Image (cartoon, rainbow, N blue to C red):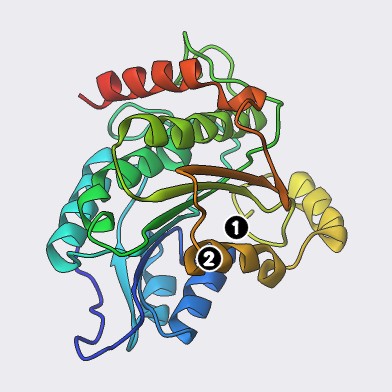
Amino acid sequence: MSPSAIDGNGSGMGIVVVSGGTNGMGRAFALERAERGDRVLVLGHNRARGEALASGSMAFLPVDLSSVTETRQAIEHILTEYPVVDGLALFANALAPRRVLTADGLERTFALYYLSRYLLSFGLRPALDRAAAPVIVNVAGVGITRGEVHWADLQLAAAYSTITAQLQAGRANDLLGVGFAQRSGSRARYVLYHPGFTRSGDRSALPWIVRGLLAAASVAARPVVGAVAPIHRFLDEPPATPLTAIDRGRQLPPDFPTLDPRDAERLMDLTEKLLR
């Protein structure tokens, strides 16, 4: 991995790392942070899109975030090059119409949408804890109660579908926020954020009929700029509590069903074993 470097003379307000920042909401957020004066590091696998972003206060690090090895390498690079990280924004996700296994033998949606966020959250803790007011924002589907973590079949070998995989990873991210607050010991505030249906994302891998339905639904979808606006507020004015969960503008109570602390402990233990 050879990053397009940020100009060392930049004097931005802070360092913000954005996973999945080459497309959709992640790209819009990264560009706006750079415009606000931050130095931004974008993580993503699309080299052409990433290198098109890289200039001045914005850098691009090519990485396949569905790969545990590459994600760990990216974390090592960040810890070396950026001793202080003020904000981590997690967007990386992709719809997969078929079950695909990564080189690590992991179901790709689970690896990309959940495991990369787990690794980045815990792995970047040293740099985050050196910041004055560090914040992690995990953009997923908190507030949705559909779907579940398939405890006996995390890799969905028995019954895969695009929706099942997306919902499982979404519920896993809910528990990641709880688990990070419970056991990381970090000063970073963790925000779970669900923007609602947004005109964003790459749907090229989906069947044409599904793409058509999503395109029709997008007429009523939220514009990207409106969807990312609250994320800027989370970074600029960090919450007071270790964990905050926001579903389309509504703050969820700590006892919301998908934020069960016992399930979070269970998933953290399973994840640690899986990553060994």
Residue 177: horizontal and vertical position, in percent? 47, 37
Q: Residue furthest left?
A: 80
Mark 2 and mark 1: Cα distance apart in space: 7 Å
Residue type, numbered disc 2: Asn
Q: Which residue is mark 2?
A: 23
Residue 176: horizontal and vertical position, in percent? 45, 33
Q: Residue furthest top?
A: 152
Q: Which residue is mark 1?
A: 202
Residue 121: horizontal and vertical position, in percent? 34, 45
Is 111 or 211 nearer to us in this picture?
Answer: 111
In which quadrant of the rendered view does residue 87 lie?
Answer: bottom left
- The residue drawn where x is 60% and y is 57% is 202
Is 63 or 136 nearer to us in this picture?
Answer: 136
Q: Residues at badges 2 and 1 in contact (C-beta under 8 Å)? A: yes
- The residue drawn where x is 36% and y is 77% is 51
Secondary structure type for disc 1 = loop
